[in-house]
Image: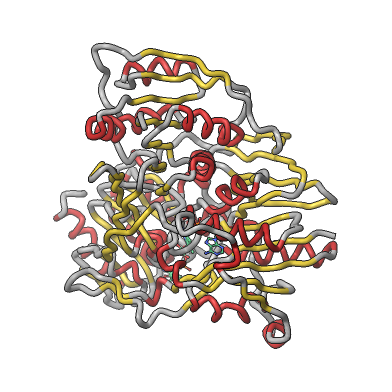
Amino acid sequence: MPNLLVCYKWTLDEQDIKINPADLSLDSSRAKGKISDFDRMALEEAAQIVEKQGGAVDALSYGTPAVKQSLKDVLSRGPNKVYYIADASAEIADGAVTAKVLAAAARKLGGYDLILVGEGSSDAFNQQTGPRLAALLGLPCVSFVAKMTLEGNTLTATRKLADCTEQVTVTTPAVVQVLSEINKPRIPSMKQVLGASKKPSGEIKLADLGLSPQELAPKAVRKSVKGFVMSRKNVIYKESNAEANVQKLVASLAAEGLR
Amino acid sequence: MAGVFVFSEDLALARQLLTPALELKASLGEPLVALTTSEAGAKELAALGADRAIWLKTEAAPEQLALALADLLGKEQASVVLVGGTLRGKHVASQVAARLDAAMATDAKTLKIADGKLEITRVLYAGLAVAEEVLVLPAVATVPARTFLPPSAVAQAGAVETVELAGDARVTITAVTATGNEGVDISAASMLVSIGRGFRKQDDVKLAADLAGAIKAELACTRGIAEDEHWLPIERYIGISGQTVKPELYLAVGLSGQVQHMVGCRESKLIVAVNNDERAPIFEAADYGIVGDLYQVLPLLTAALKN
Ligand SMILES: Cc1cc2nc3c(=O)[nH]c(=O)nc-3n(C[C@H](O)[C@H](O)[C@H](O)COP(=O)(O)OP(=O)(O)OC[C@H]3O[C@@H](n4cnc5c(N)ncnc54)[C@H](O)[C@@H]3O)c2cc1C
Ligand SMILES: Nc1ncnc2c1ncn2[C@@H]1O[C@H](COP(=O)(O)O)[C@@H](O)[C@H]1O
């Protein structure tokens, strides 16, 4: 029966981030955390596999100490156990560091048939972690997967690319990067939410992963982050009379030289 | 270290990559080397300013080349590797970066060398913010399609070489099906009517198609319409994981205007919204808007614009 590992990222909910108009800095003081959107599909896919054929799912996350807020949420989505690395270094970790930390943790835990990651994280959207992780672990990587079935040691997957879909097969262990369209994640039931608090979590100390300070130094460093502000005319026609609104819009388009 | 390298399995994108690569070459004073999977492509890239163009002779799919390519780039001591930002390209770039233990930036919009490092800009939070990032060399960056125009031909074409590469056969491709790409280049359209989940059923898309017909626009959509409903082909969806467009007019109907969508159309000249929810974020991003039911507004708008 398969042993699965799902990597998920605990990110800020971008809908709560405000842009400070004076200097375009980001104000995330009121932003709540969330499981990165597409990682919910990775969690759901793993849950569906073990529901069908047995086995076990672990979840793994590397984050700042705030990652601890994610544990119950993630456990309510299916995994039997969650492992986490809570370390301030995650704040500035780039794709290189993240993949090294996750690879070292996956190696330490050991014995997974499949490692699932999401298509891209909702904050950085690097789309790097899956393929990087596979390269570091020496495992084959199946990216952009829209559909998958696992039978014994064989994973059959449908990859969806811009101009074609590919059917591929790979012998496990492997890393799979799932597309968001692969499934519709369930909203955890009350029973799952309550059950989550009884499930185990395990902290992995960054220092126990055997990574040197050099390996933990990001190679891509953020120099500035500025909120993007749109400046638009914002002329909104909202009379109850739809015809009047349409006439005004058509006149505006004409004034803009479009008709 | 020596060399600015470009790679894309998509020749049109490979040509575009030469433009930022030529600038990086000038700043670094290192040769520009183009890698591509067809012989004709290699010749063409050599004529567009690559000092060397390497035809990667192989039967393998681009992803299967990632590790061999990384070894080649390692041997060449590449300083910067620009990869065309297709899905395949992102897979290749990430594995090359991992194998070379290199920095990587996904979807770089601007690139320059400063203090011996690669400085790029890219979006964060799906478009809410723009970040400047500094990457130590060697660095890998993917560049989205149509970010740069291709350069013009040079007087003296570079040398063309051939390297045979064996693909990684651990992932076996058993079938490839072309998706119904109708050959429309949505990014070339000067007007777009873009639809979202405000449309209740597939038949209703006709309302948008009629409007598009009246103003000679193409149809576009949000991710959900393409990926979940499959009402329009995926090459018509706009956003962070879809297309980026800059038309004269972007007419957004029944779509909420989430940042992940808007990042793909916010450079449009004029944005017009039709939405029945006055508080929908699309109105903040719009020049003009109508608050109203699309089922009522669209037929009226189509009729009015036909004349
Ligand atoms: C990491 C990530 C990447 C993403 N990438 C993309 C992307 O590339 N592209 C993309 O589009 N999305 C993307 N999304 C999804 C995005 O966040 C939004 O969920 C999506 O764009 C919303 O689609 P929508 O506007 O069609 O639907 P909704 O948000 O459901 O909006 C429907 C709108 O229709 C209006 N409406 C309803 N009925 C009517 C009516 N009768 N008349 C008029 N108006 C009506 C409603 O008021 C509402 O505003 C991404 C999400 C994530 C997390
Ligand atoms: N810090 C992290 N901890 C665990 N998983 C992560 C982390 N960062 C990224 N991932 C996984 O890698 C995927 C792609 O992330 P990214 O490369 O940042 O776009 C995410 O969907 C997660 O599954």
Vertical relation: B174 (above or below) A47:
above
Please name the residue shown 24% across and 12% down the image.
B155
Residue A185 x, y percent position in the rendering:
64, 68
Q: Residue at x 60, y 45 (%)?
A: A135
B304, B259: nearer the viewer: B259
Q: How many marks?
A: 0
* Residue B150 higher or lower than B204, as above or below: above
Left or right of A105 on screen, residue B174: right
Residue A226 image position (x, y, % from top left): 26, 64
Q: Quadrant of residue A55?
A: bottom right
Q: Give the residue drawn at x 84%, y 65%.
A: A54
Q: Quadrant of ligand 2?
A: bottom right
Residue B252 in the image: above or below residue A78? above
Instruction: Estimate the x, y position of residue A73 in percent, counting from the top left.
Output: 61, 79
Q: Is residue B228 visible?
A: no
Q: A126 and A86: which one is in front?
A: A86
Residue at the left extreme of this rendering: A255
Assign the N terminus of chain B to one quadrant of the image.
Answer: top left
